[in-house]
Amino acid sequence: MKLDSKTLEAVIAIDGPAASGKSTVGWILANSLGYLMIDTGCMYRAVTLAALKRRVSIEDEVAISRVAQEIEIEILPPGAADDGRMYTVNVDGVDVTWELRSPDVDTNVSLVSSYKEVRSEMVRQQRAFAESGRVVMVGRDIGTVVTPDAPLKLFITASAEERARRRWEDRQAQGHTNAYEIILEDVLRRDKIDSSRQISPLRPADDAIVIDTTDRTPEEIVQHILALRVS
């Protein structure tokens, strides 16, 4: 499936590892342009959460793939919600936006997202979102698989230590008490799974612009990206 040239002009692809800042950058960029931000990672999280709630074994690839095909995922603007969310995610009509960020989902989402049929179903849905145009799409295989012809591809990264620190701060704000060392271990574990999986491994597209956010604010990164578009 190829997207038409008019649509591709309105798709910006952003990839990167966990907690690299890509979602925050994507959100600010989308707001600056008047685009919709689609965080595709939340779709894999939605499948993971649904499987956990149904008590489906995360290691049962067939059953997890069936969950991916059965549930209805909606990604909407935050609307009237005033709780810091960047978007609203509904699964089968129920708002699960914050449940998607639970430690249990964090622990299991990389394995779920490695399953071939899960990725196939999510990519199908992501391309449907892209067809609407005016989209900043954030994930791990947007520039390499979902919209490989997008005219602007970005790969947002940061050191593992910085990414763990950001996730630790997020967890503290949400009332979780995970130790920094445990979160760093999980970040490194997820990096290994995401970059070594056979289906759509995490990597920059050949023509992606790599941006390190370790010592830069999201606002600085967005200004850099907007300058790229102008140039």
Image: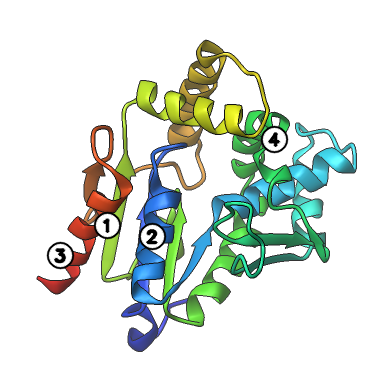
Tell me if label 1 and label 2 are in contact, CB under 8 Å: yes
SS for tag 4? loop
Could you classify mark 1 by the number of other residues whose Cα lies within 10 Å: few (under 14), some (14-19), or many (20 or more)?
some
**Which residue is identified by label 3?**
227
SS for tag 3? helix
**Which residue is identified by label 1?**
222
Determine which of the numbered discs, if any, sits on residue 102 in the image: 4
For marks 4 and 1 on the same chain, the one whose residue lies earlier in the sequence: 4
For marks 1 and 3 on the same chain, the one whose residue lies earlier in the sequence: 1
Q: CA distance from mark 4 to mark 2?
A: 23 Å
Could you classify mark 3 by the number of other residues whose Cα lies within 10 Å: few (under 14), some (14-19), or many (20 or more)?
few
Determine which of the numbered discs, if any, sits on residue 28 in the image: 2
For marks 3 and 2 on the same chain, the one whose residue lies earlier in the sequence: 2
Above or below, 133 against 80 in this view is below
For marks 4 and 2 on the same chain, the one whose residue lies earlier in the sequence: 2
Q: CA distance from mark 4 to mark 1?
A: 28 Å
* Amino acid type for the residue under numbered disc 3: Ala
Q: Position of residue 34 (x, y in %)?
A: 40, 77
| Residue 91 shows up from this direction | yes
